[in-house]
Image: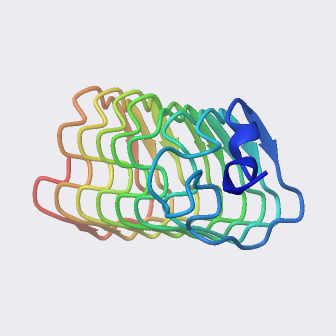
Amino acid sequence: MGWTSRWYWFRDVEEVILPQLTEYSPDAFILTPYGIGSDALSHIKHAYIPKLEKLQSGFFSPDVEYVSLSTATEIDSFAFKDCAIKGVFLPECTKIAASAFLNCFRLKNIIIPKCTTIEKNAFEMCFSLPAISLPEVTNISQGAFGMCESLSVISLPKVINISRNAFSNCYGTSEVYLKKCISIGESAF
């Protein structure tokens, strides 16, 4: 059967459920034996991985639309960069690393109720994101939501610090709720 049989037959899979997966190699789903070429699972649109604690970059193809990671506590830098993702459910996540969702222009729904840190450019250029409600976030880093043009409602009741340019070029913003904020950087809004 050779190397092509390993993942080749899964190239048309649109949904993946990995209920016991807790870790993976960054090249776990690469089709070729040398890590060159297209992803074998390049058509995945829905993923449910309840036990994965840290999502690294390169796991999902750009076509992924909906992801549920029930126990993930951290999303690594560039994990979803340039993906067509529309919704993400991260109920235990406490940290979104730099550029994790950079240029996810179709993203409309994020559920991350325990997140405390949003790093630099984490959601930059998520043009379709209409609202954010991040009840536990205490720090919003530079450019975190920059150019989120559709962002109209921002609810950050525990945020203490908003860095410069955090919400720059969010032209549609009409409501901002910041109950505990003590520091807002230059051109934050």
The answer to whether residue 5 is above or below residue 130 is below
Q: Where is residue 96? Give x, y as percent.
A: 48, 64
Q: Where is residue 182? Give x, y as percent.
A: 31, 70
Q: Residue furthest front?
A: 1
Looking at the image, which residue is at 89% across and 57% down? 19
Q: Nearer the viewer, residue 111 or 11?
A: 11
Q: Where is residue 161? Give x, y as percent.
A: 32, 70
Q: Is residue 94 left or right of residue 181?
A: right
Q: Quadrant of residue 94?
A: bottom right
Looking at the image, which residue is at 41% across and 59% down? 78
Q: Quadrant of residue 88?
A: top right
The answer to whether residue 90 is above or below residue 76 is above
Q: Nearer the viewer, residue 4 or 146?
A: 4
Q: Is residue 176 left or right of residue 34?
A: left
Colour option used: rainbow
Q: Is residue 171 left or right of residue 89?
A: left
Q: Is residue 98 left or right of residue 171?
A: right
Q: Nearer the viewer, residue 115 or 66?
A: 66
- How many numbered markers are drawn? 0
Q: Where is residue 188? Give x, y as percent.
A: 19, 54
Q: Residue furthest right?
A: 20
Looking at the image, which residue is at 57% across and 61% down? 33
Looking at the image, which residue is at 24% across and 65% down? 163
